[in-house]
């Protein structure tokens, strides 16, 4: 097998596929992430924590994809993980990954009136 690098323009186009993962799901499980997982373990669906679409952009010069979503909670929500998904419906679709913030980065539980800003930046790069 031969290894051939992908051209810069192709890397930028490939990165645009990540725009499909614009639906942000919040997960209340702090179970460690496994690459075999394709969705949240315990998806939050109430109190302002339901999966919803992020605002997305693609920089045609750099190929960087940015997604941003602010959740405003209407009641208690114990957020432990963040999952960009390719489907708007809770319990459906495939997750790009499941991000578990470092312990102490998020409160044990958000209360009514609390908010969480999720910003995701994706870029394609070659190994060094």
Image: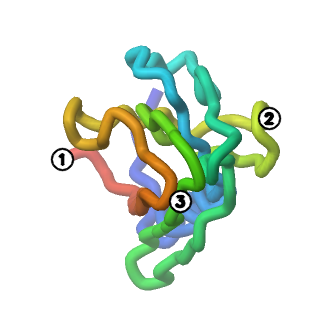
Q: Residue at the location (60% across, 65% down)?
A: 54
Q: Secondary structure at mark 2?
A: loop
In front here: 43 or 72?
72
**What residue sits right under mark 2 in the picture?**
92
Mark 1 highlights which residue? 128
Q: Are marks 1 and 3 in contact (CB under 8 Å)?
A: no
Q: Position of residue 15 (x, y in %)?
A: 53, 60
Whichever of callouts 1 and 2 sits on the residue coming sooner in the sequence is 2
Label 1 – label 3 distance at C-alpha: 36 Å
Answer above or below: position of 36 versus 44: above
On screen, 34 above or below 88? above
Q: Position of residue 41 (x, y in %)?
A: 59, 21
Label 3 crowd bin: few (<14), some (14–19), many (20+), radius 10 Å: many
Residue labelled with disc 3: 71
**Considering depth in this image, is 64 or 98 the residue closer to the camera?**
98
In percent of width and height, residue 84 lies at 57, 47
- Residue 62 in sight from this viewpoint: yes
Measured in 3D between alpha carbons, the distance from the residue under mark 2 to the one under mark 3, in whole angstroms, is 20 Å
x and y percentages locating residue 92 in the rendered image:
79, 35
Could you give the CA–CA distance between mark 1 and mark 2, rounded to whole angstroms? 36 Å
Toward which corner of the image does residue 3 lie, by quadrant?
Answer: top left
What residue is rendered at 51% in x and 39% in y?
77
Q: Secondary structure at mark 3?
A: strand
């Amino acid at each position: 097998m031969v290894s051939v690098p992908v051209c810069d323009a192709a890397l930028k186009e490939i990165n645009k596929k990540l725009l499909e993962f614009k639906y942000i799901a919040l997960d209340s499980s702090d179970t460690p992430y496994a690459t075999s997982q394709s969705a949240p373990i315990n998806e939050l669906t109430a109190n302002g924590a339901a999966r919803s679409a992020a605002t997305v952009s693609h920089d045609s010069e750099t190929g960087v994809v940015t997604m941003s979503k602010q959740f405003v909670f209407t009641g208690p929500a114990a957020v432990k993980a963040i999952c960009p998904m390719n489907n708007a419906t809770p319990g459906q679709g495939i997750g790009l990954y499941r991000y578990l913030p470092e312990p102490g980065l998020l409160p044990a539980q958000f209360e009514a009136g609390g908010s969480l800003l999720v910003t995701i930046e994706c870029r394609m790069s070659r190994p060094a």
